[in-house]
Image (tube, helix red, strand yellow):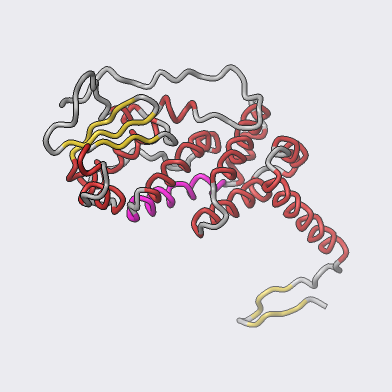
Amino acid sequence: MEPFANNKSKASTPTSTNGEDATDFEFDINCEEAWTFLVDTSNTSPGPGQVFLIAEGKTFSVRENLLIKHSKYFERSLRNPRYVESQTKTFTFDDIKAVHLGVYLHLVHCQIFGQSADVPSFEEPERCIWFPGHVEIYQLCDRFLNKDLAATVSEGLQCYLILEPSIWHDSYVSEDFENFSSFYIKSLSQCFKLLDQTNDTDRHLRRAIVYSLCHCMPIAISQECLKLIQGNHELLFEVASCYAGMLQEAKKDMKSPEKPKQWVYRGKWVQER
């Protein structure tokens, strides 16, 4: 059965960034690849070698050999006759967004055929509006036991948190900085909620989010940051603790006497007296 070419995301730009959680609208808009495997399934069932995956009322069709190649989850479900999916060749997910399932299938296709996957890398802070969607896709890779793809997506996620100070300084003087920083902070707060403290990779990403909020963003907006994340109690505690530690270090630096100047003279360190 051929994919429907006209099925595209119809997500629209939000009119406001109010609310505790940032949406992943930009992710929806920019992931047309998610709908490559979308099909019209009126009164139909999977054909030979095909598997249907259903989420939010949307049905995706993919070849079984591609689906199981790197996924232990799908291999076990489709090859073991004790599982009903091995007979129906259909999976229905009530807790997965259709766009995320579609992007996962797109990444699997790229993984198998050696194509470059369109997982945005970090270049500017505003790209982080894609971050919540990618967290959920990473979790899908982990859930479907696709270890190689999970590692690749995880590396991409961490790139979002490598914020060059010069980028922030340039953004800080722009007219739209207030709206941008608000959306960015809410986006990271949403990501923090999605990550599982008991998972090693998730725990690393949670620490990276705290570091990003405390050490990469201008200290001048620290009060605004705390205000925006106050509904996320775990993140609020971590960020507030980090700010407190930074304040203590700053006080120590102010009290410590100035160290004597040093320079190199004929290959030896010389201390000014």
Depth check: give the residue in front, 147 or 226: 147
Depth check: give the residue in front, 254 or 236: 236
Residue 177 coordinates in the image, percent (x, y) = 65, 29
Residue interval drawn in magenta: 147-163
Would you identify the image quadrant in which residue 251 lies? bottom right
**Magenta segment: does it hold 154?**
yes
> What residue is shown at x 57% (from left), y 47% (from top)?
164
**Magenta segment: does it hold 111?**
no
Indicate left or right for 68 with 177 as reference: left
Residue 159 coordinates in the image, percent (x, y) = 48, 48
**Picture quarter with the C terminus:** bottom right
> What residue is shown at x 34% (from left), y 50% (from top)?
149
Q: Which residue appears farthest toward the left when viewing the image?
A: 48
Residue 64 coordinates in the image, percent (x, y) = 19, 42
Whether residue 206 is situated above or below residue 259 in the rendered picture: above
Depth check: give the residue in front, 161 or 261: 161
Whether residue 103 is situated above or below residue 81 in the rendered picture: above
Q: Which residue appears farthest toward the front when viewing the image?
A: 82
> What residue is shown at x 52% (from left), y 37% (from top)?
128
**Picture quarter with the N terminus:** top left
Indicate left or right for 53 with 262 as reference: left
> What residue is shown at x 65% (from left), y 82% (from top)?
268
Count of numbered circles on the image: 0
Would you identify the image quadrant in which residue 182 lies? top right
Would you identify the image quadrant in which residue 169 lies? top right
